[in-house]
Amino acid sequence: MTTSSAGRPFTHRIAVADDLAALRTVMALAIAELQKGFLSDEQIAASNAVMGLDTQLVADGTYFVIEDGDAIAGCGGWSYRATLYGGDHSKDLRDPATLDPAVDAARIRAMYTHPAFARRGVGRLIMTLCEDAARAAGFRRAEMMATLSGEPLYRACGYTAIERIEAPGPNGVAVPLIRMGKALD
């Protein structure tokens, strides 16, 4: 189901700089609440150092906001840059090099659903928007670094695991992630 609390369809738009504070709030809530049952409390806390907002996506115009009236129900984007995951604070993960759609996979990035809107189709809507935009830009494949809580959605959307990693977090706490991919044609 992809309907808002009022029974109308969710709306979407491209994120702008004025959204940054609200997006960070949604991300913090999603990390804190939606990772429960998948990660330990320590791993959830460490996730804040591994995940987060990459403002390059907003600057590139490839980051979507899903809304229910004035409330942000979720957010996520895609990228034509080499960075696979991580936020502005993840300097060692960032690579602004542009990808070649003929040989490289577009990146699905920073997907978050506000906990109040979980299991209502927000993630699938973001995924559809991202895949359609990447396809329109000439990409034939997409890849992402998935959280354990996101993996069921991504598998349902046709993504398969490429590799499992443990991203180093603070205090030696590793965060398990799964690199996943899908053909877009």
Image (cartoon, rainbow, N blue to C red):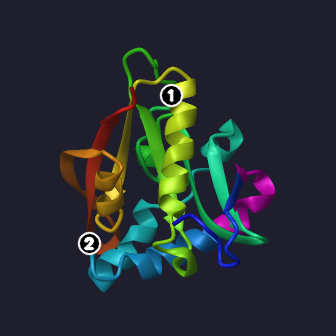
- Give the extent of the magenta segment: 13-23
Q: Is residue 183 magenta?
A: no
Residue beneath the point at 30% across and 74% down: 171
Residue beneath the point at 52% across and 24% down: 98
Image coordinates of residue 48 in percent, x first then y, are: 45, 69
Image coordinates of residue 52 in percent, x first then y, are: 51, 61
Label 2: how many residues lie within 10 Å, few (<14), some (14-19) or many (20+)?
some
Disc number for residue 74: none
In this rendering, would 156 be left or right of 102?
left
Look at the picture and state if 112 lies above or below 44. Answer: above
Amino acid at the residue labelled 1:
Arg
Image coordinates of residue 49 in percent, x first then y, are: 43, 65
Residue with the most extreme top position: 102
Q: Residue beneath label 2, please?
A: 173
Amino acid at the residue labelled 2:
Val
Image coordinates of residue 108 in percent, x first then y, are: 46, 44
Q: Residue beneath label 1, please?
A: 135
In this rendering, would 158 be left or right of 98?
left
Answer with the quarter of the image where residue 182 lies: top left
- Helix, strand, or loop for circle 1? helix
Foreground residue, 173 or 158? Answer: 158
In this rendering, would 57 be left or right of 178?
right
Answer with the quarter of the image where residue 28 lies: bottom right
Look at the picture and state if 143 lies above or below 109. Answer: above
Mark toward the viewer: 1 or 2: 1
> How far separated are the C-alphas under marks 1 and 2?
37 Å
Label 1: how many residues lie within 10 Å, few (<14), some (14-19) or many (20+)?
some
Marked residue nearer the N-terminal end (1 or 2): 1
